[in-house]
Amino acid sequence: MVRYLKTIFQHRCPTCKEPLRSQRNNLLCEKICPNGHFREEVYPHLGVRIVYENKD
Ligand SMILES: [Zn+2]
């Protein structure tokens, strides 16, 4: 299970390779590129993961 999670969750921006900033609350775990390339939202209770990528 741990290995599975590691493959799912990004820890670095795929564009600039900066470490992602993460923040979480009861509903949502968010990871955001400090340069705005990438954003990941995970809603654990819904089993939903949404990824926004900006490659420009
Ligand atoms: Zn980036």
Image: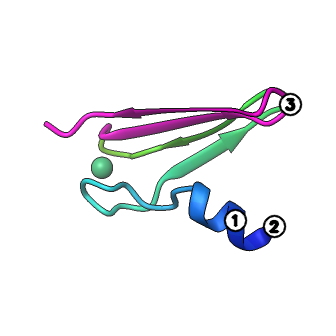
Question: Cα distance, mark 3 to mark 2?
Answer: 17 Å
Write the residue at 79% across / 33% down. Answer: 25
Element marked by disc 1: helix
| Pointer 2 residue | 1
| Pointer 3 residue | 45
Q: Is residue 5 left or right of residue 56?
A: right
**Residue 10 screen position, x and y as percent:** 51, 57
Q: Amino acid at mark 2?
A: Met
| Pointer 1 residue | 4
Mark 2 nearby-residue class (10 Å; few <14, some 14–19, many ≥20): few
Mark 1 nearby-residue class (10 Å; few <14, some 14–19, many ≥20): few
Indicate which disc, 1 or 3, sits on the residue closer to the N terminus: 1
Write the residue at 30% across / 40% down. Answer: 37
Residue 40: say if magenta. yes
**Are the residues at dot 1 and dot 2 in contact (C-beta closer than 8 Å)?**
yes
Task: Identify the image quadrant of residue 7.
Answer: bottom right
**Residue 31 screen position, x and y as percent:** 55, 44
